[in-house]
Amino acid sequence: MLIRPFRPEDEAQIVALWQACGLTRPWNDPHRDIARKLTEQPELFLVGEVSGQPVASAMVGFDGHRGWVYYLAVHPALQGKGYGRMLMAHAEQLLIERGCPKVNLLVRAGNRAVIDFYDKLGYAPDEVVSLGKRLIADT
């Protein structure tokens, strides 16, 4: 799998990938999420491609204190081939190069398969409560 930055022509395929992986939610417009990411650290919006086709993604960010990974996705037909591990290793290396001391990510509590995936990569639950407040409604 080749890992490269997102290109505007990837948008439809990446949104379809996120939908296939169950990552989209009605209150988050994926097209707006992409537009927002492209205004901040667009080089950290990663796409994995196989045979010239986007099959994986990760939105990575660093705020000077912590790194974050969102929208890690691998096409369901290609899961289990190591592409998710490759993408996370690449994301971690980009964060290390920026001096990032710790990376965080969010997984829905009931998503056992994804929690197990991250556990195998050395991630563990933090003793924190995630709080959120919607500032701009997408719907």
Image: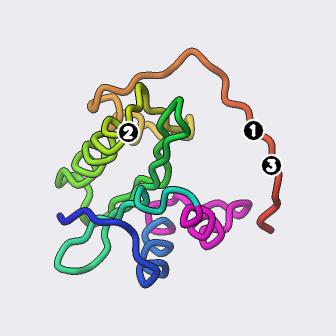
- Could you tell me which quadrant the N terminus lies in? bottom left
Q: Please name the residue shown 56% across and 34% down the image.
A: 109
Q: Residues within 10 Å of mark 1 (few under 14, many from 20)?
A: few
Above or below residue 25? Residue 16 is below
Q: Is residue 69 visible?
A: yes
Q: Specify start and end residues of the magenta stretch as a single range.
A: 19-39
Q: Residues within 10 Å of mark 2 (few under 14, many from 20)?
A: few
Q: Is residue 110 visible?
A: no
Q: Secondary structure at mark 2?
A: loop
Q: Mark 2 — residue?
A: 98
Q: Residues within 10 Å of mark 3 (few under 14, many from 20)?
A: few
Q: Secondary structure at mark 1?
A: loop
Q: Nearer the viewer, mark 3 or mark 2?
A: 2
Distance between the alpha carbons at the discs numbered 1 and 3: 7 Å
Earlier-in-chain disc, 3 versus 2: 2
Mark 3 and 2 residues: CB-CB less than 8 Å, in contact?
no
For residue 48, side relative to residue 61 (left or right):
left
Q: Mark 1 — residue?
A: 132
- Could you tell me which quadrant the C terminus lies in? bottom right
Mark 1 and 3 residues: CB-CB less than 8 Å, in contact?
yes
Q: Mark 3 — residue?
A: 134
Above or below residue 130? Residue 75 is below
Task: Say which amino acid is labelled 3.
Answer: Arg
Task: Say which amino acid is labelled 2.
Answer: Arg
Above or below residue 108? Residue 35 is below
Q: Position of residue 80 (x, y in %)?
A: 21, 52
